[in-house]
Amino acid sequence: MGAHEQPPHHPHKQKTPRSGYSVPRPVCAWLACGFVSLALLHLLCCTPPGTQDAVLSPLLQYVDDTYNFVSSGPRSCNYSEGRWVYAPGHARRYNGTECDVKESHDCLRNGRPDTGYLDWRWQPGGCRLPAFDAGAFLSAARGKHVALVGDSMVRNQAQSLACLLAGAGFPHRVVYRDAGPRGKPDLWRWAFPTHGVTVSFYWAPFVARATGKALNDTLPQSMNHVHLDAADDLWGADADTMDVVVLGAGHWPLNGAIYYVNGEVIGHHVHDELDPAMDIGYTRPMRMAYRTALDRLSRSGRPRTVVLATLSPGHRYEGDTLATMCPRKTPYEEGEHELRDLDRELVGLVYEEAEAARARNGEGGATRVEVLDVTKLAAMRPDGHPGAYMHRDPFAREVQPWMAADCVHFCLPGPVDTFNEILQHILMRKRR
Ligand SMILES: *[C@@H]1O[C@H](CO)[C@@H](O)[C@H](O)[C@H]1NC(C)=O
Ligand SMILES: *[C@@H]1O[C@H](CO)[C@@H](O)[C@H](O)[C@H]1NC(C)=O
Ligand SMILES: *[C@@H]1O[C@H](CO)[C@@H](O)[C@H](O)[C@H]1NC(C)=O
């Protein structure tokens, strides 16, 4: 992530006019203290509850910002590093039912009783991540096609983006919501006519052209045929209309596939029936798929921004009953959870491919390439998944054996909204 500097706060350097005599410092401090206490007391006992929040939140926010500035110093900001801080109501920004999210992500509708997972915001080290601003996003994207291309985590992010924009009151129209059955294009599209903005999601779990399980749920998990030298047909057909492209595919290559270049098999992963010497793992195919996609998107010379999203890791199921799967109610605290080696490997791969694409495109190329590094912030949120609440009122009747828990995607609204806060920051800051 690039450098982003905030003007430093100097809260204690305000000059007070000096009078002819001075009050001893401790007295001053006590007077100030007493005044603030009285003001707070007044606020707490004499104003309606809504006002208290309204007044206290900015105050706490200010203290928090100042603390963060003082504790981390005025160094450049890296949004991929940070911690979740308590911020009541921060993620309560839209109603998932009203913006028509996938039912299995609509945790509130599905009866999830605890809502504390909506009370956190991401605090990067050394700077403040501004809350999502729908008006600013739409203005920055005026007349543009914002395409999110990839797996179901990218779909999760695309729905979040559409809801953040629609939930802020901007008129919108659902153009497509074709979520299967597989074999049909899995294409979602929303239009925001006031700014001529289109937001689309294109299903492409390998980014590259894929058939098999990717298009047909009934097949075994590893039964994918992936052509690493071609963009997937669905997004490839529209590539020349895209101005902002978020690309993300981390989960499916781990499950396995047979890989092709030029129509010839070049290797496989997780196919025991094939020659074990031909197992090429998952990183090489992922690199090749990203390269093909980035070259496809750089070729036309159309000015655009391509953002490579890193893996959003799921969480281990902590129990074997529906009720005990991803049951946490709060984010992990710093030091409580480490990224897996696999997560680090995939994050590194994305940074390297972004850098390689910048080098191939050359200085001042039309295509700007950025990284949306969400791995750490997602890994710290075991509390933000639907879990059993991917089903409506899962415990209202007897739990059925076919019922599963979702500990991979995030509730909407939920932590995935932060991905779009960072996307907004990337789009609005200057090119590096
Ligand atoms: C930001 O932090 C990540 C993770 O620690 C690191 O991989 C990346 O290189 C950093 N980015 C910058 C611009 O320093
Ligand atoms: C969301 O909107 C629906 C439909 O308008 C409403 O029934 C529901 O109570 C709302 N949910 C929340 C959590 O506000
Ligand atoms: C999906 O795969 C099954 C099993 O091979 C097959 O019977 C079915 O026709 C396929 N469906 C589609 C839409 O291709």
Image: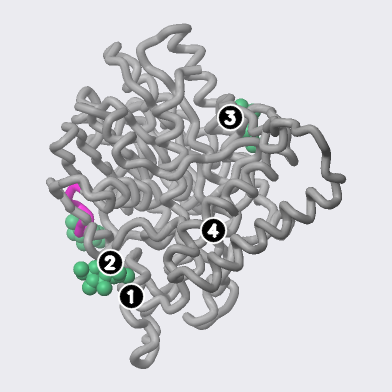
Give the amino acid type for the residue marked by disc 3 in the picture. Answer: Gln
Residue at 71%, 37% in the rendered image: 12
What whole-number distance in Å separates the C-alpha atoms at marks 3 and 1?
Answer: 40 Å
Answer with mark 3 or mark 1, whichever residue precedes in sequence. 3
- Residue 6 numbered mark, or none: 3
Mark 3 is surrounded, within 10 Å at the Cα level, by few (under 14), some (14 to 19) or many (20 or more) other residues, namely few
- Residue 56 numbered mark, or none: 4
What whole-number distance in Å separates the C-alpha atoms at marks 4 and 2?
Answer: 35 Å
Which secondary structure, mark 3? loop
Answer with mark 4 or mark 1, whichever residue precedes in sequence. 4
Colouring rule applied to residues: one colour
Q: Which residues are magenta?
A: 180-185
- Residue 110 numbered mark, or none: 1
Residue at 19%, 52% in the rendered image: 183
Is the distance from the Cβ of mark 4 to the nearest ligand 2 atom less than 8 Å? Answer: no
Farthest front residue in view? 20
Q: Does the magenta stretch mainly form a helix, a strand or a loop?
A: loop
